Amino acid sequence: MPIEANHLGMAFELHEREIENSTYFRYCAAHEFRLQCCHACGLIRYPPTTACPWCASPNAHWVVVEGKGTVHSYTEVQHAIQPAFKALVPYLVLLVELDTQRGRPTEHEALRVVGNLTNADGTLAPREIVGAVGIGSRMKMVFADVAPGLSLPQWTLDHDAPQPQWPWRYPGISTSPSTAASVRSP
Ligand SMILES: [Zn+2]
């Protein structure tokens, strides 16, 4: 059975013949973050693919990966590209570098996972938190159930982790100290 969903007016369909992606999303639907681990070289990879990007082995198994990491980069969406997004802006798209396998196989590489900035319940974060997260912020993964059978891995601030006093933000979009302080100490 394919995974079929409608999210914000957009149809989503994922066939079983897309073995890697459908397996990945079935784990997500169960709120499990699993990635492929190569049998030959032992490295974990993201996104799901048919072969290892480092050694080309097609043999891998799915391992549970801890959803914790640091914001590596981000973009702040302020203008809706479709009408359904109009009520949601501004929102952040985060590229979070996982703690797992950081700096491997070379010092420049890591598992970096895309997701939106959300509250702990998976809903998009409000404006004051959007303005307080930046490069260096510590994040943990949550799953947002967007339709039956479809859950998306998203990112929320990890309040149990030490946060940087001033996460790096692109110039022109300011973070007020009072907001940052309130985000750090809920
Ligand atoms: Zn490999």
Image (tube, helix red, strand yellow):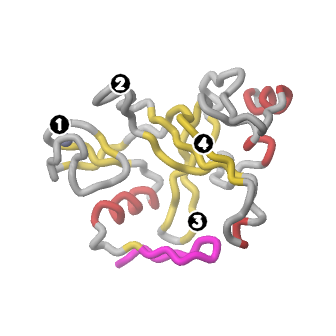
Q: Which mark is residue 88?
A: none
Q: Which residues are magenta?
A: 1-13
Please identify the residue farthest to the front as the structure is shown.
171
Camera-near label (3 vs 4) is: 4
- Quadrant for ligand 1? top left
Mark 4 → mark 2, Cα distance in angstroms: 21 Å
Q: Are marks 3 and 4 in contact (CB under 8 Å)?
A: no
Mark 3 → mark 4, Cα distance in angstroms: 22 Å
**Most foreground residue, 63 or 112:** 112
Q: Which residue is under mark 1?
A: 41
Q: Which residue is under mark 3?
A: 146
Q: Main secondary structure of the magenta part?
A: strand
Q: Which residue is under mark 2?
A: 107
30 vs 185: above or below: below
Amino acid type, mark 1: Cys
The crowding category of the residue bearing disc 4, from other C-alpha atoms within 10 Å (few below 14, some 14 to 19, many at least 20), is many
Question: Sequence-wise, which precedes: disc 3 or disc 4?
Answer: 4
Write the residue at 80% across / 42% down: 128
Asked if ligand 1 lies within 8 A of label 1, the reply is yes
Q: Which residue is under mark 4?
A: 74
Mark 1 → mark 2, Cα distance in angstroms: 17 Å
Question: Sequence-wise, which precedes: disc 1 or disc 2?
Answer: 1
Question: Sequence-wise, which precedes: disc 3 or disc 2?
Answer: 2
Write the residue at 27% across / 73% down: 17
Write the residue at 65% across / 46% down: 120
Camera-near label (1 vs 2) is: 2
Which type of secondary structure does the marked residue at label 4 adopt? Answer: strand
The crowding category of the residue bearing disc 2, from other C-alpha atoms within 10 Å (few below 14, some 14 to 19, many at least 20), is few
Write the residue at 44% across / 75% down: 13
